[in-house]
Amino acid sequence: MALRNQVAESSATWADPELGINLRSSDENLKPGESRLMQNCEFFGSVRLRRSNQRVNSTSLGPYAIKGGHMFYFGGAAAPQKKNLIAYNNRLSVLSGAGVETVLTSSLSANKNVFMSTWSIKERAYIANATNALSYYDGTTYATLSGTNIPILRTAAVPVRDRLLGITNDGIERTDPRSDTVWSRNSSWATLRPSQQGPFTALHPTTLKTADTILDGAIALQGRAYYLINGTNYGDDVTELAEPVDNDASIKLIDGTVGTSSPYSLCTVPGVGTFWFTSDANIFWIPDGGVVGRYVGDKLQSTVATLGLNNVNFAALDQVWISYHERILMIGIPVYSNQYATVQFWMDMRSLMEHPDRGPVWYGPMLGQSIGRVWNANQQGESTLYGGEGNPGAEAFVYTMRVNGRYIDAIGASDIPVSMEYIPPFLGLGSPSKEKYLQAIHVDANSYTGRATVDIIDTDGTLTENIPLQAVTN
């Protein structure tokens, strides 16, 4: 027999958080499917505790932060090989799968941001840090490049068609075709320069697709602008004084208001597009094959107590990172006065591709880790994400990220269990203005460790806190 004025179950049921978090709207304006908080959890069939990380090296490499990482694949199909490269303090090293370090050099300038990339034409990994001349590692030998106009690159060397491009103090320089030892230098035609004031801050390869053409190029960014670099012929001799007649490489301003100060934040998701963190603390997305994008981080602009993108340490924007791994786009931001990322947000790529009408779906914040660098191992049958410790106080450790079945954070030499907090939207129960008497709350939950509790909160404040869930068995 139904009680008088009993609320219908259809009005008393919380929708699954298929729309992720919304830190911008007020509690009463959250939509069904949105959440106020999904701290350390994600929606995958149900709300689940986020996966955690595991140490690669069991002992510290020293009281330093990891400043760069890169999985270098070489050898081709006949003899495939790989080397996990890491940079910290003044060192560039190879770290084995068992965590054993082989030092390649101790001559880098100490504690610099290190950028690494691979050029398959030469089967070399290139190392840049805005201070030392460009160097390389071929799987056997580490050396500084020698040749003509070898540059000091501000960020990574970027392969485009049959050459390398890189940012210097003069602009964007390029190499001769299939060469890494002959570079342009402050050329009237071969050096690409911005049309707006200020230096280039990032460079990222891109591919444009038309109905019958695929065009390779790059996106170049300033703090408040981005450009498209494109062409089919970049000149046979980039040291010539006069521009060759067949040079058709160009740089075009696409947007003079959106840029980045975060060179580690540019990330391309196959079939989806390119994302980056903007200088005004948002996420910008250029869909696959295009050059015009849109903001997708508005729901992470926090108007509540929860940390959002707008709480980033603007003095450390160059430490923001973005990476893609197994259908999740991950962003790490430093907050307060931190010089390394301590807060992560995860974007659900499955939702974006299968349900574009929903818009971007974010989970987080993910708290507990202090990851300064991330890099993918995604060739030769691998699908692994690595992270480097960003906090020098926790010392130099490398981690395997998002390990299945692991819910304990490795933070330096410590292991810290992960705890989650999930806040669904305010539920008016079909009649928001009426006072209700809650007789019971039914929750379906599985626990890995510990015991779940519930807070009952109304729009005017907390009513009851830390109610332990009682297990019910039939």
Image (cartoon, rainbow, N blue to C red):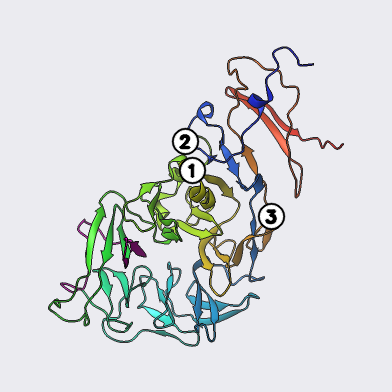
Q: Residue at x 65, y 46 (%)?
A: 45
Q: Is residue 422 left or right of residue 103?
A: right
Q: Quadrant of residue 249?
A: bottom left
Tell whether position 196 is magenta: yes
* Dot 1 amino acid type: Gly
Q: Dot 2: few (<14), some (14–19), or many (≥20) neighbours within 10 Å?
A: some
Quadrant occupied by the C terminus: top right
Marks 1/2: CA distance?
A: 9 Å
Q: Nearer the viewer, mark 1 or mark 2?
A: 2
Say which label, 1 or 3, has the lower sequence index.
Answer: 1
**Residue at disc 3, secondary structure:** loop
Question: Is 90 in front, or is 389?
Answer: 389
**Which x, y percent locates residue 437?**
71, 18
**Which x, y percent locates residue 182?**
28, 83
Using the image, tell me which numbered label, if any, was put on residue 24: 2
Marks 3/2: CA distance?
A: 29 Å
Q: Quadrant of residue 175?
A: bottom left
Question: Which residue is the site of mark 1?
Answer: 308
Which stretch appears magenta? 187-214
Quadrant occupied by the N terminus: top right
Asked if the residues shown at circle 1 and circle 2 are in contact, with their CB atoms under 8 angstroms apart, the answer is: yes
**Residue at disc 2, secondary structure:** loop
Asked if the residues shown at circle 3 and circle 2 are in contact, with their CB atoms under 8 angstroms apart, the answer is: no
**Could you tell me if residue 203 is visible in this image?**
no
Name the main secondary structure of what is drawn in magenta.
loop
Question: Which residue is the site of mark 3?
Answer: 407
**Residue at disc 1, secondary structure:** loop
